[in-house]
Amino acid sequence: MLVSERLKRLLRLVPGERRFGFYRFLPFFFVLGGAMEWFMINVRIGNETFYDVYRRKQSERQYKARMEKGE
């Protein structure tokens, strides 16, 4: 059995094909997005989370802009 046939068979198992069409997969994307957001906020890799790094880089950019403006 080819991979595409298996994939088609798996996708047909998701209910709502006739009523919602492709949009029947939308709840999966919402859950995936929420899980990714939770992971980025709560899971520490080393000593930092994604948002710790983001905030640090943002403050570094602001500091650099202030120093360039002040010179």
Image (spheres, rainbow, N blue to C red):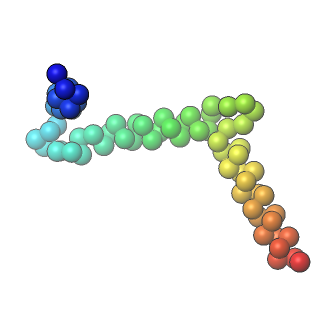
Image spot of residue 64 (x, y percent): 80, 65
How many numbered circles does the render carry? 0
Image quarter in which the N terminus is found: top left
Give the farthest residue toward the front. Answer: 2
Quarter of the image where the C terminus is located:
bottom right
Residue 35 appears in the figure: yes
Q: Is residue 11 above or below residue 30?
A: above
Residue at screen point 61% across, 38% down: 41
Residue found farthest to the right? 71
Question: Is 46 placed above or below 51 here?
Answer: above
Q: Nearer the viewer, residue 8 or 39?
A: 8
> Quick one: which residue is furthest to the top in this view?
1
Q: Is residue 53 left or right of residue 24?
A: right
Q: Position of residue 66 (x, y in %)?
A: 82, 70
- Give the quadrant of residue 20: top left
Percent coordinates x, y for residue 30 in the rendering: 39, 41
Tell me if 2 is positioned left or right of 70 in this view: left
Which residue is at a point 71% across and 57% down the rendered structure image? Answer: 58
